[in-house]
Image: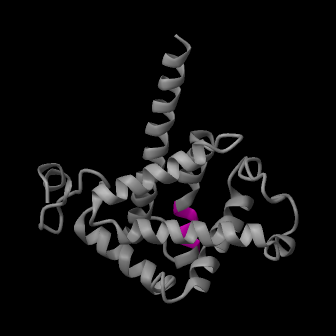
Amino acid sequence: MDRMEEMINEPAQRNSVCVFTNLTASEKEMLKECWRSVVGQLIVDDQKVEDFGKLLLLWLLDNVPNAKKPFKKFDANVTKASLTKNPVFLNHCRMVGMYLGQMVELLDKPVELEMLTHQVAINHLSMKPSVGTAYFDPFQEKFPRFMSETLQKPLDDPLIKAWDKFLMVLTGKVKKSEKMIAKSQKCAMC
């Protein structure tokens, strides 16, 4: 382990906060246990991963303003029944579930988690239209409610708060990447 990784990695104390995720070791463990109980092991049950992604995306389309706008590979304005039969939508559901699962599994590997969140951010920011903070901020704001409803826990439950912090890792990376891209485009125009 190199010095950078040692500095980023969370100390063994259960209540210390990881510099990269802002999560404690106990919150990370709660998230992992929750993910495994809701979705199972990623490799073992691909259908549960897709089902979770479908649940999240359908909820997102119903509850987050402008969520339907950036989807160009499938029509997000059709009925839920039509969407859930669309292979492109279902593939996107699988990808969402897979990336979330990978992020959860990498909570104790902040360098790898940072690389994955960077990849996800760049993928979204490279879309036409770009899917950046204008979409991620409202999603971040509403995500705790989704998890509260899904897990049937109150919004102030420690697990729901941990999920909120978890998503902030991704939205924070989107914000940083968006600023970096804007800055590089500005420099390219000089």
**Residue 167 x %, y %:** 46, 57
**Residue 108 x %, y %:** 27, 66
- Taking the image as shown, residue 71 lies to the left or right of residue 169, namely right
Q: Work out whether residue 157 can be spotted.
A: no
Location of residue 128 (image quadrant): top right
Q: Work out whether residue 184 can be spotted.
A: yes
- Taking the image as shown, residue 136 lies to the left or right of residue 129, namely left
Magenta stretch: residue 147 in it? yes
Residue drawn at x 44%, y 49% is: 118
Q: Is residue 184 above or below residue 56?
A: above
Location of residue 28 (image quadrant): bottom left
Most foreground residue, 54 or 34? 54
**Magenta part of the chain:** 144-149
Residue drawn at x 59%, y 53% is: 139
Q: Is residue 150 above or below residue 13?
A: below
Most foreground residue, 132 or 137? 132
Magenta stretch: residue 132 in it? no
**Residue 92 x %, y %:** 67, 66
> What secondary structure prevails in the magenta region?
helix
**Residue 101 x %, y %:** 46, 72
Most foreground residue, 52 or 185? 185
Looking at the image, which residue sits at the far bottom?
44
Q: Which quadrant of the rendered structure holds the N terminus?
A: bottom left
Number of marks drawn: 0
Looking at the image, which residue sits at the far top?
190
